[in-house]
Amino acid sequence: MQAVTKGDLRPASTKAECFYCKQPIGGEHLADCVLVRSNYASCIACIKKVSTGEVVLYRTDVWCYGGLNFYLWQDGNYSCDCNRALFFERTKGTEPTSINCGESEYLVNIEVRGKIEYREYG
Ligand SMILES: [Zn+2]
Ligand SMILES: [Zn+2]
């Protein structure tokens, strides 16, 4: 949850509430408020298929509240080959022909604002 603060008010607004989700100062933004979404930074996951060496660029978001957080890719759901196979193939406009769970078929580097912030391959 994220608190609504004075910084979330808009000059044009006369009310002491979030311009987007209308929650009052001191309250909490609704989960789908655009300001809550700003806890994510856009990033590019450079997904490499180990067997072929092919790399695709998959656009996504990374949790950045309190600093960039790559847990999802490191140990979470996206660390598994089954999710990575989906991202890899869908980036190319295809569907994976086979999906295996594991952590050896795909490697990922993640670029945030033009800089690689998370690296699995050199
Ligand atoms: Zn809000
Ligand atoms: Zn899996």
Image (spheres, helix red, strand yellow):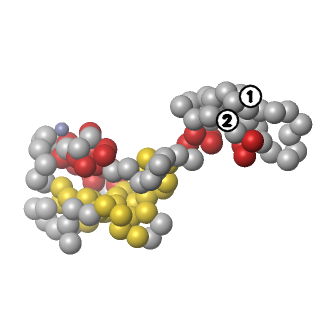
Quadrant housing the C terminus: bottom left
Q: Is residue 85 above or below residue 2?
A: below
Q: Which quarter of the rendered image does ligand 2 occupy?
A: top left
Q: Is residue 73 above or below residue 31?
A: below
Q: Residue at x 57, y 47 (%)?
A: 38
Q: Is residue 51 above or below residue 67?
A: below
Residue 16's image quarter? top right
Tell me whether circle 2 and circle 1 mark residues in contact (CB < 8 Å).
Answer: yes
Tell me the distance, in whole angstroms, between the alpha carbons under discs 2 and 1: 7 Å
Residue 102's image quarter? top left
Q: Residue at x 69, y 30 (%)?
A: 26
Residue type at tag 2: Val
Which residue lies under the disc numbered 2?
4
Q: Is residue 22 above or below residue 36?
A: above
Instruction: Establish whether ligand 1 lies closer than 8 Å to the Cβ of label 2.
Output: yes
Lower position in the chain sequence, tag 2 or tag 1 = 2
Quadrant housing the N terminus: top right
The reply, left or right, for residue 110 in relation to residue 50 is right
Which residue lies under the disc numbered 1?
24
Residue 101's image quarter? top left
Residue 95 screen position, x and y as percent: 26, 46
The reply to whether residue 61 is visible in this rendering is no
Residue 5 screen position, x and y as percent: 70, 39
Badge 1 marks a residue whose secondary structure is loop
Q: Residue at x 31, y 46 (%)?
A: 71
Query: Dot 2: within a 10 Å radius of its alpha carbon, few (fewer than 14), some, or many (20 or more) residues?
Result: many
Closer to the camera in the image, 94 or 62 = 62
Badge 2 marks a residue whose secondary structure is loop
Q: Residue at x 49, y 54 (%)?
A: 41
Residue 9 screen position, x and y as percent: 77, 42
